[in-house]
Image (cartoon, grey):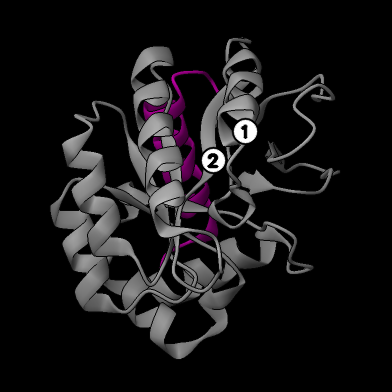
Amino acid sequence: IINIHSNQKINGNTFAIQHRHNFFDALPKTYYSAGLLPENITEVWPTHFTLLEAALSSNLALAISGCGLNKNCVVNWQLQQQAFSAQVKLANKFKKPLLVNADLASDELILLIRENQNTQTVIFYTSNTAWPMAEKLLAAGYWLSFNKNLRNTKTQEVFLQTPLNRIFFFSDDAAVPVEELYQLAAEIKALALNEIILQLELNFKKVFKIPVP
């Protein structure tokens, strides 16, 4: 079972990519992702970006995560766009996928991803995404990652229409274990749990370019 974004250490049979958005000098000794969250961007973001670039140079760094745009925060919009564009270019440089936050800004993100000539896999966190936008993201070639909101009817409708070979799961800070999301996914798709597990392993190998640890 795979969790592509966790802020907490996971025990048991679940493989989790540990996310870091601060303290890039205190990186885990296991696979991790790192990125600059839009709500944390300030005028000195280029300094943090330099630390991020160093963190991503490790073979343990699997993705740039948590980057994006957030219309729900007070951070200067232009600074958010600058920081996100820089991270798109960084993904191209290191050939690592982008895990993207889109708080009311999916259309703007699609535009910036294209403007910065992204060549890497893009995975959108789908916390509250409705189907029309999810359909647009899928049509653009992007992937979708689902979290605890899979319990919600609207998100279940999106999940049901999303091809299984374009899906991931993540927990972030949530207390809902990813194992529960896998079981719920099997029920929604009317598939055996093992079919979900095997397809997500194939998805992981395709996007992250390593075997499932």
Closer to us: 13 or 135: 135
Residue at 21% over, 56% down: 138
Instruction: Name the quadrant of the N terminus.
Output: top right
Q: Which mark is residue 65?
A: 2
Say which residue appears at 63% left-offset and 26% top-offset: 47
Q: Residue at x 23, y 62 (%)?
A: 107
Q: Is disc 1 surrounded by few (<14), some (14 to 19) or many (20+) residues within 10 Å?
A: many
Whether residue 176 appears in this view of the structure is: yes
Q: Which residue is mark 1?
A: 34
Q: Quadrant of residue 130?
A: bottom left
Magenta span contains residue 183: no
Query: What's the amino acid at mark 2?
Result: Ser
Magenta highlight on residue 204: yes
- Outermost residue on the bottom side: it is 153
Contact between labelled residues 1 and 2, with CB atoms less than 8 Å apart = yes
Earlier sequence position, callout 2 versus callout 1: 1
Q: Residue at x 23, y 32 (%)?
A: 116
Helix, strand or loop status at disc 2? strand
Residues rendered magenta in the picture: 190-211
User: x, y percentage for residue 146?
Assistant: 49, 62
